[in-house]
Amino acid sequence: MHSNPHLIIHSYTHTPIPSYLHTYFTSSLRHFIPSILIILITGIGITGCNQQGQESKSKEKTKIQVAMDIPVFNADSAFGFVRTQVEFGPRVNNTKAHQKCATFLSEKLREFSKDVIVQSGTVKAFDGTSLGFQNIIATFGPSGNNRILLGAHWDSRPFADHDPDEANFYKAIDGANDGASGVGVLLEIARQLSLKPPPIGVDIILFDAEDYGPPEALQDNKNSGDFWGLGSQYWAKNPHYPDYYAKYGILLDMVGAGGATFLMEGVSMEYAPDIVKKVWDIGNQIGYSSFFIYQRGGYITDDHYYVIRDRGIPMIDIIDLDHTSETGMYRHWHTVEDKLDKIETGTLRAVGQTVLTVIYSEK
């Protein structure tokens, strides 16, 4: 485990905080489809969860206005974007596959936005290695602070250190779900934003160097630190525009696997519970209740944490959490089986359509 002035959290990125620390934490702080009409939906009660799992029914009733044309998310297009990333090979920093993917992502976003910035530099990994990184940023809609931030990481893990076979621990993973799925969804959202300008400003940031933290065998207080989310840490301290601010952010991480369950992640609930509720309510109201579950998940060290801590922007994490797995994470998380055949268009659609509905319901 590691600690900082704001948070005590498990040292491993994406890993739920141990239950015995929960009290301390909480107290210390493809083809275009015509638009469809999603009508006004109000007065729907929700069922949540408590610390142990299930919560009693919310006494307050949700009132969300979704009363305009919402673009239809094309899950086949998003799947194609995921496949292209995976076909480059593991997108580990300082490799040819990584650079080829960076070129693809920046060129693809330039097809959808005239305002694309590639923020590049070097950061230090846990072992002292200098990692070349590229945060790729695309801007849509009107200028000003009335905007939201969407993010995902595009690099992939150099260590399969949660694989059942120890022989695979130091093999790089394809990262079809852990990285490529969130990016695929955001590229399709970017395509839709280019076809129908959003009512508010939207910034899409593809963060780099998120998953280069120490392998499981080397994790201790000395090596844990802030060696995760290196690209998002850099951006949060050095935004692409001075004094950048957004009303809130949504991070997509592991959003493509079949049978995904998006629990209400702990850091998100600590710092942006109203945004979690808003997104989950919309996801449920438009038909994706089997994905967006009103149940607490673990506290996760992810890019959203650094955006919150270092930029002051409330940001939530839509991430596949599984209470039934040994790690509490997506079943193939940080294993060599995180491959393209685990990705399903139904999951991509649930996330993409929910996020599009959030965007076009903003005022």
Image (cartoon, rainbow, N blue to C red):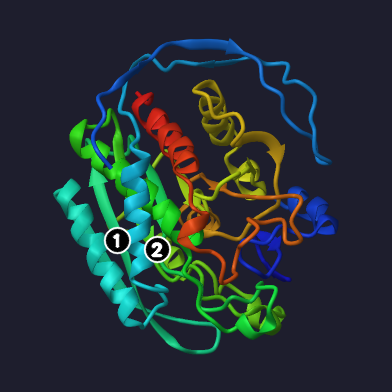
Is residue 107 rendered to the left or right of residue 102? left
Q: Residue at x 32, y 39 (%)?
A: 145
Cα distance in 3D space between marks 2 and 1:
9 Å
Q: Which residue has dot 2 on it? A: 154
Residue at the bottom extreme of this rendering:
128
Q: Which residue has dot 1 on it? A: 136
Q: Residue at x 56, y 78 (%)?
A: 159
The amino acid type found where label 2 is placed reads Trp
Q: Does the CB distance between marks 2 and 1 fall below 8 Å?
A: yes
Decide which of 351, 8 is in the foreground and name it: 351
Q: Earlier in the sequence, mark 2 or mark 1?
A: 1
Answer with the quarter of the image where residue 330 lies.
bottom right
Return the mark for residue 206. none
Is residue 124 rendered to the left or right of residue 56? left
Residue 238 visible in rendering: no
57, above or below 333, in the image: above
